[in-house]
Amino acid sequence: MISERTKDGLASARASGRKGGASYKMTHAKLRLAAAAMGKPETKVSDLCKEIGITRQTLYRYVAPDGSLRESGKKVLKKS
C-alpha cells in the first residue's frame, strides 16, 4: 500500500511538471567563471572552489584543468 501511494505521488508530481532530484551545483555563471579561471596558470584550484562554493571534484567534473569544458559542462550550458 505504501509503495502504491508513493508511485501515485511521483506520477502526480511528474504530471504537474516536477522532475525531482537535486538541482545542479554548477550554474551557467559559475561555469563561465570557473572555465576562465582554470585557463590561467596562476589560479589556485582550492581558492576557486571556495569562492564558487563547490568541491574540487565538482569543478573537475565540469571543467578540465586547461579551462575547456567537459561533457557535463556542455550540458549545463545547453540548459541555460
Image: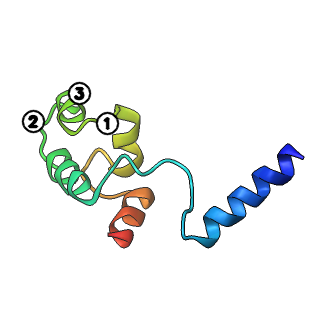
Q: Nearer the viewer's eye, disc 3 or disc 1?
A: 1
CB atoms of marks 2 and 3 within 8 Å: no
SS class, disc 2: loop
Query: What label sits on residue 46 in the rendered view?
Result: 3
Residue carrying label 1: 54
Q: CA distance from mark 2 to mark 1?
A: 19 Å
Amino acid type, callout 2:
Glu
Query: What label sits on residue 62 in the rendered view?
Result: none
Q: Is residue 50 above or below residue 39?
A: above
| Residue at x-position 33% and y-position 42% | 59
Q: Classify mark 3: residues with Cα within 10 Å, few (<14), some (14-19) or many (20+).
A: few
Q: Nearer the viewer's eye, disc 2 or disc 3?
A: 3
| Residue at x-position 30% and y-position 55% | 27
Q: Nearer the viewer's eye, disc 2 or disc 1?
A: 1
Could you tell which of marks 2 and 1 lies nearer the N-terminus? 2
Could you tell which of marks 3 and 1 lies nearer the N-terminus? 3
Report the front residue among 50 and 42. 50
Residue 23 coordinates in the image, percent (x, y): 44, 51
Q: CA distance from mark 3 to mark 1?
A: 10 Å
| Residue at x-position 37% and y-position 46% | 25
Residue 20 coordinates in the image, percent (x, y): 56, 55
Report the front residue among 3 and 43. 3
Q: Is residue 4 above or below residue 79?
A: above
Query: What label sits on residue 42 in the rendered view?
Result: 2
Amino acid type, callout 3:
Ser
Q: In this image, 44 relative to 69: left or right?
A: left
